[in-house]
Image (cartoon, coloured by chain):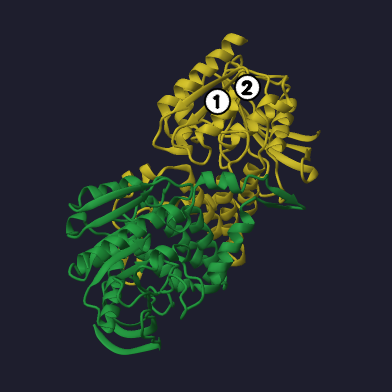
Chain colours: A yellow, B green
Amino acid sequence: MAVQQTTFTTVRQGDQMALGGALEVILPLRYAGARSVSIGYEIVGPARAPVLIVAGGISAGRHVISSDEFAESGWWECQKTALSAARILAIDWIGSDGALDCPIDPTDQALAIAAVLDALGIVRAAGFAGASYGAMVGLHFAVLFPHRCEQLLAISASERAHPFSSACRSLQRKAIALGERADDPAAGVALARALAMLTYRTADEYRQRFDAAPSVEGLSVRVSAEDYLDFQGARSAARTSAVAYRRLSESIDLHQMEASQLNLPCIFVAVESDWLVPMEDIRALADHVPQARFIVLPSLFGHDAFLKEQDQVSAILTEFIASLESAQ
Amino acid sequence: MAVQQTTFTTVRQGDQMALGGALEVILPLRYAGARSVSIGYEIVGPARAPVLIVAGGISAGRHVISSDEFAESGWWECQKTALSAARILAIDWIGSDGALDCPIDPTDQALAIAAVLDALGIVRAAGFAGASYGAMVGLHFAVLFPHRCEQLLAISASERAHPFSSACRSLQRKAIALGERADDPAAGVALARALAMLTYRTADEYRQRFDAAPSVEGLSVRVSAEDYLDFQGARSAARTSAVAYRRLSESIDLHQMEASQLNLPCIFVAVESDWLVPMEDIRALADHVPQARFIVLPSLFGHDAFLKEQDQVSAILTEFIASLESAQ
C-alpha cells in the first residue's frame, strides 16, 4: 500500500483534535488488482480518548457527527452524545466517488481503513463500531488486522449476505442499468434507492405511516408511500452516481467471512424485524465466536434500527465506548 | 352492460361441455366510465356439474386447466383433478390485452364476469374460487351480485392491499415507466415482474434455492438468483404489455371492500409465510364475516402457495366443490 499523498483540510491541536482529508494510495483490490484510490476521512473527538473506527451503510461516509470543525450534521448525528466520548475515525467508502468501476470487496474497504490508520500514525484502534455494510467491513477488518482493533461492535451484519437480500439488490442494479439505457442514470439510481428503502424498513411501519387509500387523478393512480419513496430516491440520486451505487451495492453481496476467524471480544446486535439481515443469521455468527455477546433489538424499523432507535443504540454505544476506555 | 357480440370458438355438447370465446361489451368502469371491452372466457367441465367461477393472479387468465378441447396446460393445471368435478368458468382479466389504458377497479372485473354469465345464460354460479387478485375480484363479485354466487373460496386476499405491498407495486410500475423511457418497454416489464416474483415468495425459499456465492467474471458481479429472475422477467415481458402490467398492478392497489358486506358462506385461506397479503389481515377479514371459515396454510412459498402447495390446496378445493354439489 504505497501512500502517494496526504492532504489535511483541517488540523487543530488541544484537547479536541479534528482532521479531515483525502489520502491518495494504491490499494491491492481483491478483484480489480492494484488501483489508485482517494480515501476521504475524518477524525474528531478528544485527543486522549480511545480511537473508535465508525462505519455505517453504503450511503454513509466519513462525516459521522457534527463538530466545531465540521459543523454539518453527520449520518449518525442522533448518536453524538454517545460517540463524543471517543475519538472517531471514519472514511468515505472507496467507490463512493464513482471513480472505481470494478467489483469492490468489503475487504478492500478494510485495507482502505488500515491505510488511513497508517497515514495518521495510529498503530491500533481501541474499537470498531459498524452498522450494516460498515459492520461487514468491521468483521473483515478484525480478521485481516487482528492487532489493529481491540473490540468490535457489529450491528446488523452476518457472515454473508442472505440470498434473498442479494436478489433484491440485483434488481436494484437492474434499475440502475435501465436508467442508464434511458439516458437518465439519476432516475435509475432513484428507483434503486427507493427499492432499497423498502428493504430497510418493515411492513408494520408502512402500515402506520402510509395507511391512506391510493389516489386516482384522471388516469393516474398513486399509492400513499409514493411521494416519500420519490423523495428518498431523488435525494439519493442527487449525491450518488450510478457507478458508485452499483459497485457498493455489489460489495454487500460479495461479503463473506467465517466466524471462526474472529479472535477479539465482539458484540453482535440483531434487529428482530430486520428481514434484510435476519436475526437468526446474526445469532449463528455470534454462536461461533468465543468472545461474543449477542444483543437483540426490538424495533419497528427493521434494518434501519441503528439510525432510528436512538435510545437503545445509544445505550449500546455508551457501554461499548466505556469498555474501550477502561481497557486503555 | 350492452352485449354487442358473442363469439364462441368451440362448442361441444354431451356430458362434457367446453366453450371459449370473446365477448364484446360496454362496461361502466368505476374510474374510466363506459368503455368497450373484449372479455376472453372459457367454460369447461361436466355439463351437469356445479358452475364454479375460478380466478387467479393478475397474470392468470381464462385457461385454468387443460381439457380435450383446449389441450394446453392451464395456470392451475396442478389442480386439474380437484377442479374436474366442477364446470369451470374463467375470464381473461379486462386490461390484460393492453387495450384499456385507464385505472381498472377490481369491481370492474366483477362486472366483466357477470357479463359473461349473462351471455352464457347462467343466472347463478354455485361458487367462486379465487386466489390473489382473483380472490379480491371474488370478494367484490359476492358483494355486487349476492344472488349470483352461493359460496366463496378466497385464497390470499384481504379487505384491501397492504400499504407496504402497494409501495412495492408502485416501484414495479416505476420500472415499467423507466423501460418505456429507455424505449424498451419489455425490459421495464421484465424488471417489474422480477420484483413481483420476489414478493410472491419467501426469504427461506431463496436460502434453499439460491445459496451459491455470487460470481465475479471480469468486472461483472452476478448473484445466484439472477438467472432465475431474468428468465421469469423475460417470460412475462413476452406475453404482457407495459400498459397491461401497469393497469392490472394498479388494480390490486385499488382493491378495497368491507367484510360486513359479505352475506354468503365464505372460506378464507391465508398462507403463514405470505408477506404480500399478511395472514393477520385475512384473519381480520374472516373475523367480520358471519359465515366464515378461516384456514391457515403452512408453506415455504408465501403468496405463491396457491400454485405450489398442490396437496393442501387440492384438499381445500375438493371439499369446497363437494359442498357446492351437495348444495345443488
Q: Position of residue A138 (x, y in %)?
A: 63, 29
Disc 1 marks which residue? Answer: A268
Looking at the image, which is closer to me, B156 or B153? B153
Q: Is residue A141 above or below residue A222?
A: above
Closer to the chain start, of discs 2 and 1, is: 1
Look at the image and tell me whether residue A230 can be seen: no
User: Mark 2–mark 1 contact, CB under 8 Å?
Assistant: yes
Looking at the image, which is closer to me, A146 or A97? A146
For the image, the number of numbered tags is 2
Disc 2 marks which residue? Answer: A289
* Image disc number at residue B153: none
Under mark 2, the amino acid is: Val
Distance between mark 2 and mark 1 Cα atoms: 10 Å
Position of the C terminus of chain B, as image quadrant, is bottom left
Which class describes the residues within 10 Å of circle 2: few (<14), some (14-19), or many (20+)?
A: many
Q: Position of residue B126 (x, y in %)?
A: 25, 68
- Comparing marks 2 and 1, which lies closer to the viewer? 2
Q: Is residue A242 above or below residue A130?
A: below
